[in-house]
Amino acid sequence: MIDLVPALQDAIRGAIRAVITADPGPAAATDLDVDALDVVVQRVPDDKPGDYGSPVAFALAKRLRRNPAALAAAIKDRLELPPGVARVEAVGPYLNVFVDPGVFVRAVLALPHEVERSGRKIVIEHTSVNPNKEAHVGHLRNIVLGDALARIERAAGYQVEVQNYIDDTGRQAAESLFAVGYFGAEHDGTTKYDHWLGALYVRLGQAKDADGDTIERGVTDVMHALERGDLRVEVERIVRAQLETCFALGVEYDLLVWESDVVAAGFLQRGLDVLQQLPSVTRPAEGKYAGALVMDVSAFLPGLEEPQVVLVRSDGNAMYVAKDIGYHLWKVGRLEGLRYAPFAEQPSGAVLWTSAPTGDASVPGRTFAHGDQAVNVIDARQAHPQTIVRTALQMTGGGKDEDSLHHLAYEVVTLEGQAMSGRKGVTLAIDTVIDEAVRRARAVVLEKQPELASADEVARAVGIGALRFAMLKSEAKRVIDFRWDHALNLAGDSAPYVQYAHARACSILRAVAAAGVDVRGADTVAADWSALGPLEVRLASEVARFHDVIAQAAAADAPHVVAQYALDLATAWNGYYNHKGPDGKPDTSVMRSAQGQREARAALVGGVRDVLARSLHVLGIAAPEQM
């Protein structure tokens, strides 16, 4: 069955071609590539006539040197209406399109659920929590953004690999591990391990004033042990505890990449070897950069106050950006060298792999890295280093296109207006937030349905959904101030609002099934599509946006676009459900509709339910059938 909007765009292009053929006019018209013309077709506001509209005549009038209104009328006169379009009117420079309700709604319900799969691979790195303490609400935004983006990219047809970088050689991990021996502490199992270790980390920070020298020497020794790989098992214990939190949020990964393995693979020096083949990478003999290895990025980043990027200082110490460039050359397939081993079985049953010193160089059926594009979910403060890494990939041809690295930059999360600090202990653990969210959600669910058998399951879906949505509904570059009353609000612009809309649709469909109606989408038996009208068109047009929204969100690395769409669809559905006719009585009831209309409306409700569920799924949020 035809997809109306693309068909309408093609028909408008055909009409434009006919207009130009009949009256070529200026040379600009004959040179116009009509096939490549971007014909905008968009929904018409509720207070305007028509269902869809196009400003194409207004956009073309100047180039064709024609009056916009006259051009719109000429296009309308030569337009061959595609199936589903009842008529088109020219209103000034605009084309207003009126669809045939029955044909349109059925066409929307016949749209495929899945898009065509692409061979393009996207490597997404997110989470990357220092392995020294529990993950807090600030990390929650990173984790949820990365997981939602991975789901969106998959829904858009791309192959996705999700990586979690483990900084097992850093100072934070060293301090926490040193603190265990320093305080003679033993984990008794009453507290989750990463929480227990995080408390020791804070305690050690407080002890530095009195015993700073001893602590510094001890931490340095632990850092050396970490670099040798002597404490890998201890760090793995921390990582496993942190992963429990991620799994509780519905987040899974393909590969853990350990800093010590990246170092052992020699990516730093091998990356520098690649960079030193560039004429823009030099080692000046004099001046402020004498003896240093520097990269001139001015040709790619004009206007920088300081276009010389130091890769290796004159004392021989490499800058972190140099290490990062080598690592990303591996991500896009320019370097090999890591070995792999199974790490854990995830809740879905999928194997989580890890880089490992004694692993295998290849895994049957899997090829890690080799991304056509890499996306790093890192806070906005890392924008400049990420820009330098992306520029280096472009300069070396390290990506398969000029857009080989994306930085999904997000702003910080504050806690009730206060900046969070793990060292100072000013944090709110994700585990704590999950428990509180589920507790509050359970109270609300039982208040509405005291006899609900699945109350615990629904409460968990609602509570975690509320948390995830709170991190996704705003554009990533906006600061989020985490407040309990906002994050756990179960009404308004929240996940529970969308979840309840889904549950309402499920309830109606259960009643329909009990009445013997067999809902099969566009193939629903006994549906009288001609009994549908403008109200159904409005709702169906919102349903029809799903794939365009997914494509837009994937292209822009913008999960908030899907979150807003889910709210829009839920609002459209609630508006339809509560609509009243001129007599003040409900006029969209499925079960009270005449035979034929009932089946057609039930099919549309099924489409709404499916797309609400799919929208929630790509946000990583469950869609309960009862609430």
Image: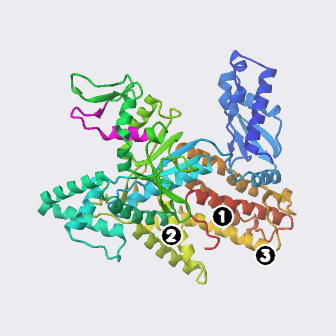
**Whether residue 194 is visible:** yes
Q: Secondary structure at mark 1?
A: helix
Rendered position, 313 above or below 203: above
Query: Whole-Å distance between the Cαs marked 2 and 3?
Result: 31 Å
Query: Whole-Å distance between the Cαs marked 1 and 3?
Result: 23 Å
Q: Which is closer to the viewer, label 1 or label 3?
A: 3
Decide which of 388, 80 is in the foreground and name it. Answer: 388
For the magenta stretch, what is the residue range? 309-328
Q: Position of residue 9 (x, y in %)?
A: 73, 37
Q: Position of residue 572 (x, y in %)?
A: 66, 59
318 inside magenta stretch = yes
Residue 57's quadrant in the figure? top right
Decide which of 587, 460 is in the foreground and name it. Answer: 460
Q: Secondary structure at mark 3?
A: helix
Residue bearing the label numbered 2: 463
For the residue carrying disc 1, how many other residues have a C-alpha within 10 Å: few (<14), some (14-19), or many (20+)? some
Q: Residue furthest bottom?
A: 451
Which three-letter amino acid code belongs to the residue tagged 3? Ala
Dot placed on the residue nearer the N-terminal end, 2 or 3: 2
Which three-letter amino acid code belongs to the residue tagged 2? Gly
Residue bearing the label numbered 1: 574
In the rendering, which numbered label is found on residue 124?
none
Which three-letter amino acid code belongs to the residue tagged 1? Asn
Quadrant, the C terminus: bottom right
Residue bearing the label numbered 3: 514
For the residue carrying disc 2, how many other residues have a C-alpha within 10 Å: few (<14), some (14-19), or many (20+)? many
